[in-house]
Image: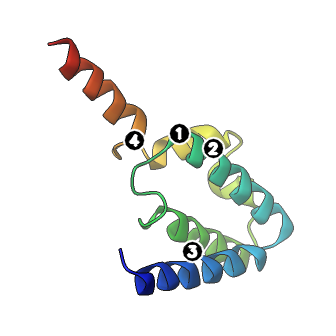
Amino acid sequence: MGIQDLIEGKKQWRAHVARVKALPPDYRIVYQEMQKYLFKVGPVDLIDGPLLPGIVDFFEEGAASGKGVLALIGDDVAAFCDDLIKDSPTYADIYQESIGAAEK
């Protein structure tokens, strides 16, 4: 990864953060909680993948239609996040596979 890639990645992340800050307060709070949860759970492609920008797109559409954030995702934010990443490899999956391979 070269310096230009780092610079471009930082620009994209700043643009993403600006979009999050433009969300209504209730959406912003839920997004930040989702982001914290997803960083802990650890989908492998979280930073470079489409998940976080997709959530912002979904939230922007919901806010534009006048819906409350919990009307979109339900009361259980963690369950919503788990459903989003159910088919995505996580760092925990990779670790479990490496332990299983080491035991054989």
Q: Quadrant for the N terminus, please.
A: bottom left
Label placed on residue 90: 4
Kindly give the residue lying farthest to the right in the view shown: 25
Pointers 2 and 4 in contact (C-beta within 8 Å): no
Between marks 1 and 2, how big is the CA–CA gap?
A: 6 Å
User: Badge 2: few (under 14), some or many (20 or more) residues near its Cα, within 10 Å?
Assistant: some
State the SS at label 2. Answer: helix
Residue for point 43% across, 67% down = 50
Label placed on residue 41: 1
The residue carrying mark 2 is 37
State the SS at label 3. Answer: helix
Residue for point 65% across, 76% down = 60
The residue carrying mark 3 is 57
Between marks 3 and 2, how big is the CA–CA gap?
A: 19 Å
Q: Quadrant for the C terminus, please.
A: top left
Q: Nearest to the eye among marks 3 and 2: give it.
A: 2
Horizontal and vertical percent position of residue 11: 57, 85
Residue 65 visible? The answer is no
Pointers 1 and 2 in contact (C-beta within 8 Å): yes
Which is nearer the N-term, disc 1 or disc 4? 1
